[in-house]
Amino acid sequence: MAEHMPHLDRTVLNTYMAIPQGNRIQAEYIWIGGSGQDLRSKTMTLESLPKHVSELRIWNFDGSSTGQAPGHDSEVLLKPVSIFQDPFRGAPNILVMCECYEPGKNGGEMTPIPSNTRASAFERFEKKKDEVPWFGLEQE
């Protein structure tokens, strides 16, 4: 498929990448989509670079468009869990890895959506801090 694509002129990209953004930071919130195999993202402009992930706000999106919530109750919350330097936009911009939650009902706690397996893994790892988990890939 790539062989059918016209050659892209990098000068166009470079022109847009060179637009001054002043002191503002572009924070690209990234999460796993409804299929469990796709990535989604959206960008928030910040006035300053956060020193810790806890300084980032919880954001939301319409989960019905990603298959992560029903249409009648579609708000899904993005909870930041990690920050990385953005290798695409360059410093000082950041990538914000997020996990997805349902809003708390009637002032209750947020709850992980069913596809948020990171939350349950984190909970289990916290209970066994004295053990060292092993991860591996099975080749078949």
Image (tube, rainbow, N blue to C red):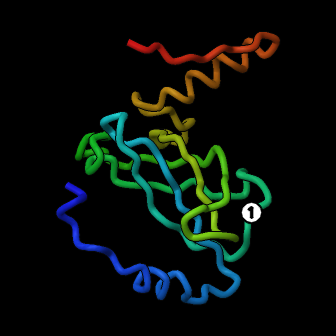
Residue under the point 48% across and 41% down = 100
Q: Quadrant of the C terminus?
A: top left
Q: Position of residue 137 (x, y in %)?
A: 51, 18
Q: How many marks?
A: 1
Write the residue at 29% across / 73% down: 7
Where is residue 27? Give x, y as percent. 58, 64
Q: Which residue is mark 1?
A: 50
Instruction: Please indicate whether residue 103 sits to the left or right of residue 121 in the image.
Output: left
- Identify which residue, 103 or 56, lies in the foreground: 56
Q: As displayed, is residue 63 above or below residue 134?
A: below
Instruction: Say which quarter of the image contains residue 85.
Output: bottom right
Tell me: 75 left or right of 58: left
What's the residue type where badge 1 is placed? Pro
Side of 23 where 120 appears, left or right:
left
As drawn, is 32 to the left or to the right of 73?
right
Residue at x-position 52% and y-position 81%: 17
Quadrant that contains the N terminus? bottom left
Q: Residue furthest front?
A: 3
Residue at 35 percent across and 36 percent down: it is 37
Image vertical order of residue 19 relative to residue 10, above or below: below
Q: Viewer-proximal residue, 49 or 64?
A: 49
Query: How far across and how far down the image is residue 75, in percent?
Result: 38, 49
How far across and how far down the image is residue 136, in percent? 56, 17
Dot 1: few (<14), some (14–19), or many (≥20) neighbours within 10 Å? some
Q: Quadrant of residue 22?
A: bottom right
